[in-house]
Amino acid sequence: MDIGKKLQAVRKQKGLSQRELAARAGLTNGTISLIEKNRTSPSVASLKSLLDAIPMSMSEFFSSFEEEQDRTKVFWGADEFTELSPNGPGGLSLRQLGDASRHALQILHETYPPGADTGEKLMAHESEEAGIVVRGEVEVTVDGQTRTLGPGDGYLFDSRLPHRFRNTGSEPCEIISACTPPTF
């Protein structure tokens, strides 16, 4: 999966220069250049900012990486999920079930190794999201409220509120989450 090449193609398709995209996303054009050359991997928050500036959802961005699937497909093996954060910061993994651009619901299997997070910049997108911690602990910040959640704990919030996820513990954290509509 070549995120840099894909970002460059989408940017050019939309008629944006690196400098213009950087200004819209609040990043430097040097950062855009490094991402497009695959010399650095963007954090989830940075990639989200870039795609919001285009505008394009993460599910739309990654849907073209999947092979065309029969609309009647209802089952996916663990190896068929789409990784939305390849080489994510600190080993963060956001694996999407199916092609969210074809549905009203996005399901993610999230894994946060110790120290991993979604980025220092808080995210916001047009949606609602919910999740349940399966194992480990995660610190969730939503609109200035912060709480550490453990196994069996959950969250549900309006995704337009600024939010961030961070594993401050010493064990990996695993979450099953949903987002509707799939704008992440």
Image (cartoon, rainbow, N blue to C red):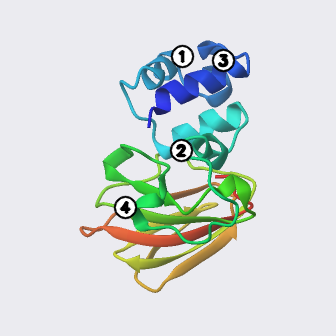
Label 1 packing within 10 angstroms: few (<14), some (14-19), many (20+): some
Under circle 1, the secondary element is helix
Image location (x, y in percent) of residue 159: 69, 60
Local secondary structure at mark 4? strand
Quick check: can you spot residue 160? no
Q: Is residue 115 left or right of residue 110?
A: left
Residue at 47%, 66% (x, y): give it: 109
Q: Which mark is residue 12?
A: 3
Query: In the picture shown, does residue 64 fall above or below 151?
Result: above
Spatial CA span between label 3 and label 4: 33 Å
Identify the residue under disc 1: 29
Q: Quadrant of the N terminus?
A: top left
Taking 105 as reference, is 100 above or below it?
above
Q: Nearer the viewer, residue 123 or 98?
A: 98
Report, in whole angstroms, how far the alpha carbon at label 2 lies from the one at label 3: 21 Å
| Residue 35 located left or right of residue 167 | right
- Residue occupied by mark 4: 112
Q: Position of residue 122 (x, y in %)?
A: 57, 49
Q: Amino acid at mark 4?
A: Tyr
Which residue lies at the image location 30% right of the left edge and 67% below the top edge? 172
Number of residues whose C-alpha sits closer than 10 Å to that of mark 2, classed few (under 14), some (14–19) or many (20 or more): some
- Residue 21 appears left or right of 181: left
Q: Amino acid at mark 2?
A: Ala
Q: Earlier in the sequence, mark 2 or mark 3?
A: 3
Going by the numbered disc 1, the residue's amino acid type is Asn
Work out whether mark 1 precedes mark 4 in sequence or the reverse, and give the earlier one. 1
